[in-house]
Amino acid sequence: MGRDKAFLPFRGGVLAQFIGDQVAAAAGDATLIGDPSRYASFGYPVIPDRYPGEGPLGGILTALQHSTRDWNLVVACDMPGITSAFLVRLLEAAENSGGEALIPVRQPERPEPLCAVYHRNSLLGLETAFQHGERKIMTALAGMRMVRFPIDEPALFRNLNTPEDWAAYARE
């Protein structure tokens, strides 16, 4: 897109603030992973990414390493269709899943590991995969108890990767 999607204007604020608000409404609080000097103004705690430049899996590891909760919502900052109601459904499903991660899956077979719930027990397996050079989240999860959560709500995960995509979405 050519710019940090976290700062795209959205609903009177910016996209990352909106996502943080949805997570906090669903889970009771939210923590951002990234550069504290850039994200401190959102009003949520910010933890520096322990693995900058290593992709989203590094951010997930950072979050799990700092969490005191059993179940952790992980949501990328560029998902404007996400709602707190959907995140509550994810958390409830995860708590009853018996898995180490609950991953929404759109049909046909499109997993969304950046809007998912990870149990703190998933940390060891994810760290091991990461230390062996794996950076793809779904590959890192392959040997774990991953539960697929089928969804049929395409608006939740609309892909907005170009300025044109964003402009079209903002006009709706």
Image: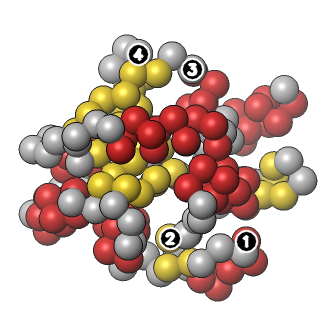
Mark 1 lies on residue: 42
* Label annotation for residue 33: 2
CA distance separating discs 1 and 3: 28 Å
Q: Name which residue lies at 73% across and 38% down.
A: 166
Q: Residues within 10 Å of mark 3 (few under 14, many from 20)?
A: few
Q: CA distance from mark 3 to mark 2?
A: 27 Å
The residue under the point 51% across, 16% down is 152
Q: Which residue type does callout 1 highlight? A: Phe
**Amino acid type, mark 2:** Ile
Judged by depth in the image, the label closer to the viewer, 4 or 3, is 3
**Residue 7 on image: x %, y %:** 73, 61
What residue did someone put label 3 on? 153
Above or below 172: residue 140: below
The residue where tag 4 is placed is: 107
Query: Could you tell me how far apart the alpha carbons at marks 4 and 1 are, in whole angstroms?
Result: 34 Å
Q: In this view of the protein, can residue 141 be seen by the observer?
A: yes
Q: Secondary structure at mark 4?
A: loop
Q: Which comes before the other along the chain, label 4 or label 1?
A: 1
Callout 2 environment at 10 Å: few (<14), some (14 to 19), or many (20+)?
A: some
- Dot 3 and dot 2 residues touching (CB under 8 Å): no
The residue sitting at the front extreme is: 96
Query: Could you say which disc has been placed on residue 124 in the image?
Result: none
Q: Position of residue 155 (x, y in %)?
A: 63, 25
Q: Is residue 40 left or right of residue 30?
A: right
Q: Earlier in the sequence, mark 4 or mark 3?
A: 4
Distance CA(mark 4)–CA(mark 2): 29 Å
Quarter of the image holding residue 133? bottom left
Q: Earlier in the sequence, mark 4 or mark 2?
A: 2
Residue 130 visible to the viewer:
no
